[in-house]
Image (cartoon, rainbow, N blue to C red):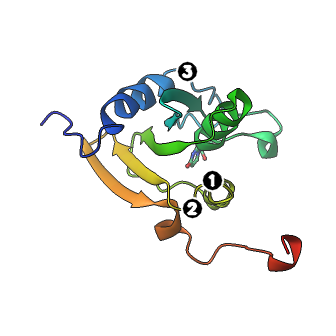
Amino acid sequence: MAFQPQAPWEGRAYEAAVEARDSAHAPYSRFCVGAALVADGHVVRGMNLENRSFGATLCAERVAAAAAWSMGWRQWEGMAIAAEEAIVPCGICLQFLAEWAPDLPLLLINLADGTEQRRTVDEFLPYRFIGKRLIQ
Ligand code: THU
């Protein structure tokens, strides 16, 4: 069945995440991920960018978030994430997104079976690092 958006931002984000995945640079894992963040009404794409120094790899979610931030688009409505299986964003990405948008809705697209899941950042990482002493 074709994708059924449940919020206005989801339709554009779904398509953009699937397209962004085609631009992934994943020669080492061959696991391609696409992300699309709706920020200030713009759809900002991200894709995983792997590096031969593996630890330097950037996930699709952080690429999209950094790109939106760099454009000055800081009102984030939701992020779609597409992969060939049901994935949950990694802990680093969830912590990164939570810095600005703990309630950000995430649309997780499983391209293998055509299903989606919806959760917020906070639902996936409720016990993240806060560091109260850092922000007093
Ligand atoms: N990856 C992402 O881009 N997002 C995730 O949420 C999980 C993992 C990437 C990192 C690496 O390039 C590949 O997927 C395999 O871990």
The residue to which callout 2 is attached is: 102
Q: Is residue 47 left or right of residue 10?
A: right
Q: Nearer the viewer, mark 2 or mark 3?
A: 2
* Earlier-in-chain disc, 2 versus 1: 1
Q: Which residue type carries mark 1?
A: Leu
Q: Are marks 2 and 1 in contact (CB under 8 Å)?
A: yes
Dot 3: what SS? loop
Find residue 127 and report its image quarter: bottom right
**Residue 3 point in image, percent of width and height:** 21, 36
Q: Is residue 135 above or below residue 7?
A: below
Q: Are marks 2 and 3 in contact (CB under 8 Å)?
A: no
Q: Mark 3 highlights which residue?
A: 23
Structural crowding at the residue carrying mark 3, measured as other residues with C-alpha within 10 Å and reported as few (<14), some (14–19) or many (≥20): some
At x 58%, y 31%, the residue is 46
Residue at the location (56% across, 42% down)? 75
Report the amino acid beneath label 2: Pro
Q: Is mark 3 within 8 Å of ligand 1?
A: no
Q: Which residue is mark 1?
A: 97
Which residue is at a point 36% across and 27% down the rendered structure image? 15
In the displayed structure, 131 sits above or below 15; it is below
- The answer for how far apart the CA atoms under marks 2 and 3 are is 27 Å
Measured in 3D between alpha carbons, the distance from the residue under mark 2 to the one under mark 1, in whole angstroms, is 7 Å
Q: Residue at x 53, y 38 (%)?
A: 31
User: In what quadrant of the picture does the C terminus appear?
Assistant: bottom right
Residue 113 in picture, x, y percent from top left? 25, 43
